[in-house]
Amino acid sequence: MIISELKPFPEILGYLDGDKKVFIVGCKGCAQVCQTGDEPQVLEMKQKLEEEGKTITGYCVIDFLCDKALVKTRLFPHEDEIDAADSLLVMTCGIGVQATAAVVNKLVHPAANTINVGGASGEWRGSERCRECGDCVLDLTGGICPLTACTKWLINGPCGGTKNGKCEVEPDVRDCGWHLIYERLKKLGRLDKMQTMPIVKNYAKMQPPKHLRSTIMWALEQQETKV
Ligand code: SF4
Ligand code: SF4
């Protein structure tokens, strides 16, 4: 279970500054439980954005937005609506935003922050994709998470070790996360996003909120400790 909470509406509007037409993607998995990306929240967001003068070219609510193959299949019938949009607003956790970015050649904006519950998961396996930092920056990075794509968690550009697109830590097997971010933004014609850096992150938000600590695995761990 991945916990997400909607970003403040003014922050979302800020992401969409300059984008007149938007396609919205929601999630019926964890985001349904968190009430961040199910159909009612998607329709509410649609209405709020229309009141702000945006045109919503379409929307789609997918069972598990963290399942990249499923996202590709479900977005396929919406190809024309997505083509007509300037960007996509994705209402779910950071993994769902990245799965959408991986199958669509448009800029994606995260509508939610992913809250730390002490362990990442999601249906898009193969690599860690979200560290549940509570302050999602995917809007600036072309939908690729710098906290997982970069070996050193760098959030404001590459270290001096990147060479031929590879990470200095494991050059044989690992792409440089910041090279991937640069290439992605270049492909989208949005390298201007890199000019808005440095990203200032509030790492205090990486702490699991107290109510989650006391109700999920922390409670179980405490029980185990007592046995
Ligand atoms: S920036 Fe990365 S770690 Fe933070 S919520 Fe977004 S995807 Fe997750
Ligand atoms: S080479 Fe790239 S991925 Fe590796 S630590 Fe440096 S910036 Fe991060």
Image (spheres, rainbow, N blue to C red):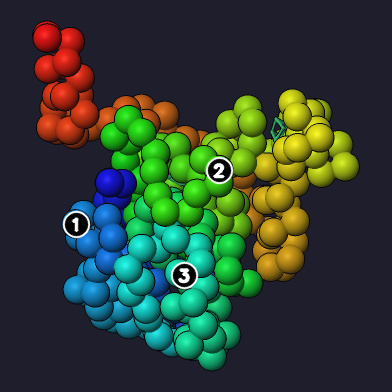
In the rendered view, would you say 115 is above or below 196? above
Q: The C terminus lies in which quarter of the figure? A: top left
Task: Report x, y in % for residue 20.
Answer: 49, 81
Task: Report x, y in % for residue 206.
Answer: 37, 31
Which kind of residue does numbered mark 3 sit on? Answer: Val
Q: Is 210 left, or right, of 66 in this rendering?
A: left
Verify CB contact (< 8 Å) between mark 1 and mark 3: no
**Marks 1 and 3, Cα distance to the nearest angstrom?**
19 Å
Which kind of residue does numbered mark 2 sit on? Answer: Ser
Q: Name the residue: 51% across, 67% down.
A: 69
Residue 90 is drawn in which quadrant? bottom left
User: Helix, strand, or loop for circle 2?
Assistant: loop
**Marks 2 and 3, Cα distance to the nearest angstrom?**
17 Å
Task: Report x, y in % for residue 61.
Answer: 33, 74
| Mark 1: few/some/many CA within 10 Å (<14, 14-19, 20+) | some
Task: Report x, y in % for residue 165.
Answer: 81, 44
Identify the mark nearer the N-term, 2 or 1: 1
User: Helix, strand, or loop for circle 1?
Assistant: helix
Q: Which mark is residue 71?
A: 3
Identify the mark nearer the N-term, 1 or 3: 1
Identify the mark nearer the N-term, 2 or 3: 3
Which residue appears farthest toward the top when viewing the image? 226
Q: Which residue is mark 2?
A: 127
Q: Is 40 left, or right, of 176 in this rendering?
A: left
